[in-house]
Amino acid sequence: MTLAEERWTETRIDRSSSDLDRAARRENFPVASRLLPSGIRGKVVAFYRFARAADDIADDPDTTPEAKLARLDDFARGLAGDDGAGPAAALRHALHDGRDAPDAVALAAAGDLLVAFRRDARGIACADWADLMSYCDASAVPVGRFLLAVHGENAATHGPSDALCAALQVLNHLQDLGPDHRALDRRYLPGDWMAAEGAADADLGRPFLTPALGRVVARTLDASDVLLTRAAPLPGLVAARGLRLQAAATLALARRLQARLRRGDPLTRRVALRRTDFALAGLSCLRFVP
């Protein structure tokens, strides 16, 4: 999970979560917005801190893969109750050790994230679109499933949520093509598409998209558009008002980011959402206010 530079709305949980406030300002799609009910925010804050801490481990360029994996194993023990300290244990406590069914689902979603972080820790080069979607199933889908679980949403929301989360992850990867390759030895673009278009991994280190790599990016954007189409029904299926509005705004932001990526070159300059995008996304979700 790489983070972007702007936000749609400020995160204001409480004084104890001021570090989350600062971090959320760098996100395209903040997880813990003030749209969420106060009784749920604590769980979401704990989830965010857990995910952020594990992500930082996987992304640390100065730590060996072996050391990263060992630290991620510590997080797994924290979720399982074998470690009483750290962000994983704090998340487990926030979810009451998974004693209730929704909290158990949410706790399992957090564990699923570790699958993706372990893969990131080793370095990654996706073989094809199916491989990338498999990665997204662990890196992004659990975020949506966590939010749905703590809100008590039904299973009808799962498919559209999974598609939206996968699309967000793909778009985020496209934003960070260059840094992911140079600093972390990662390539999330489908390898078979790279080969078919005549692009090479070395092209990711250039200061601009080559024609071949540009075709791969365009093909990836086309595939993400299919995901966003599948995600479109989500706001209408979510019962919780705050989560419904957040889903609508996030979907709108994803579409605007996708459009910017089609027009920009992420190797030349990071393609990011602008304040106008956030404002327009906010307006677009008003129709979902009861």
Image: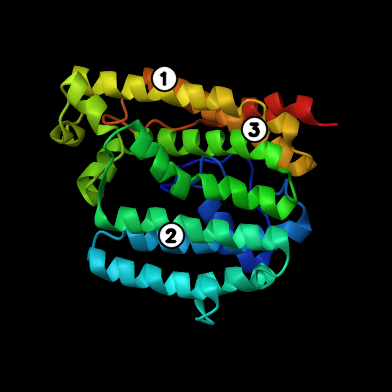
Q: Which residue is mark 1?
A: 222
Who's the residue at 53% across and 30% down the image?
254
Where disc 3 sits, the SS reads helix
Question: Which one is nearer the viewer's eye here, 8 or 148?
Answer: 148
- Quarter assignment of residue 275: top right
Q: Is residue 210 visible?
A: no
Mark 2 or mark 1: whose residue is earlier in sequence: 2
Residue 279: image location, x then y, percent: 63, 29
Q: Position of residue 108 (x, y in %)?
A: 56, 60
Between marks 3 and 2 in the image, the one whose residue lies nearer the viewer = 2
194 left or right, relative to 176: left
Q: For the residue labelled by badge 2, is the local secondary structure a helix, a strand or a loop?
A: helix
Q: Mark 2 highlights which residue?
A: 114
Residue 106 pos. (x, y %): 62, 58
What amino acid type is highlighted by mark number 2?
Leu
253 on left or right of 69: right
Q: Which mark is residue 249?
A: 3
Please, what is the three-letter code of the amino acid marked with disc 1?
Answer: Asp
Cα gap from disc 3 to disc 1, whole angstroms? 21 Å
The amino acid type of the residue labelled 3 equals: Ala
Q: Nearer the viewer, residue 279 or 134?
A: 134
